Amino acid sequence: MSGKVLFVCLGNICRSPLAEGIFAHLVRERGLEGKYLADSAGTGNWHVGQPPDRRSIAVAKKRGVELPSLCRQVRKADFLDFDWIMAMDKSNQGDLQAMCPPAQRGKIKLMRDFEPAADQGADVPDPYYGGPYEFDSVYEMLLRCCTRLLETLETTIPGGDAATA
Ligand code: 4NP
């Protein structure tokens, strides 16, 4: 098991690029670059090639977190290429499970199952139709999830290079 993590939501412009940026930021803060590789993708294809939603970019920038990735859709190869596939909500999780080879289904996890004190099976709510409050709230939620996820991976994964593992 190594540290390649794919964050997945519906549009890949609000939640999953935020999760990717936050996770990569935490990895850098802890000096763990090289051990982890973060990426994000959407189950839908409406925004392929576009940067993240400007509200996600703004809420991250306020905390010194960059969101460099462009939108892409989930592809079959992702189930082999990544070790951890983090669905933002149960609908994303169901879509991923439907397209995932059975042998890889164990890689698919629900993001908020890593949030301390959250109910099992809770969703990261989609802020797309919300305002700044919803984006702030999703940022803080994703920070809690990413922090616990990285702590969990650190207890699971021996030292090594995610790019070559
Ligand atoms: P996301 O939010 O899944 O968090 O990126 C959405 C962004 C766009 C759309 C849906 C959800 N859309 O339908 O365009």
Image (cartoon, rainbow, N blue to C red):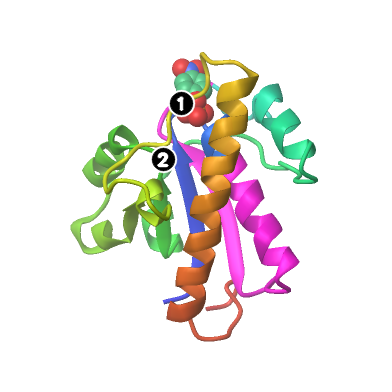
Q: Element type at marker 2?
A: loop
Q: Looking at the image, which residue is at 32% across and 40% down?
A: 122
Query: Is the residue under label 2 in contact with that under label 1 (CB below 8 Å)?
Result: yes
Q: CA distance from mark 1 to mark 2?
A: 9 Å
Decide if ligand 1 comes within 8 Å of the CB at mark 1. yes
> Which mark is drawn over residue 126?
1
- Percent position (x, y) of residue 140? 58, 41
Q: How many marks?
A: 2
The residue type indicated by label 1 comes to Asp
Mark 1, other Cα within 10 Å: few <14 / some 14–19 / many ≥20: some
User: What residue is rendered at 42% in x and 65% in y?
Assistant: 83
The residue identified by callout 2 is: 88
Using the rendered view, name the quadrant where residue 18 is placed: top right
Q: Specify the segment rendered in magenta.
A: 18-46
Query: Residue 102 at x, y = what percent?
Result: 19, 57
Q: Is residue 85 visible?
A: yes
Examine the rendered structure and indicate whether residue 26 appears above or below residue 63.
Answer: below
In front: 7, or 103? 7
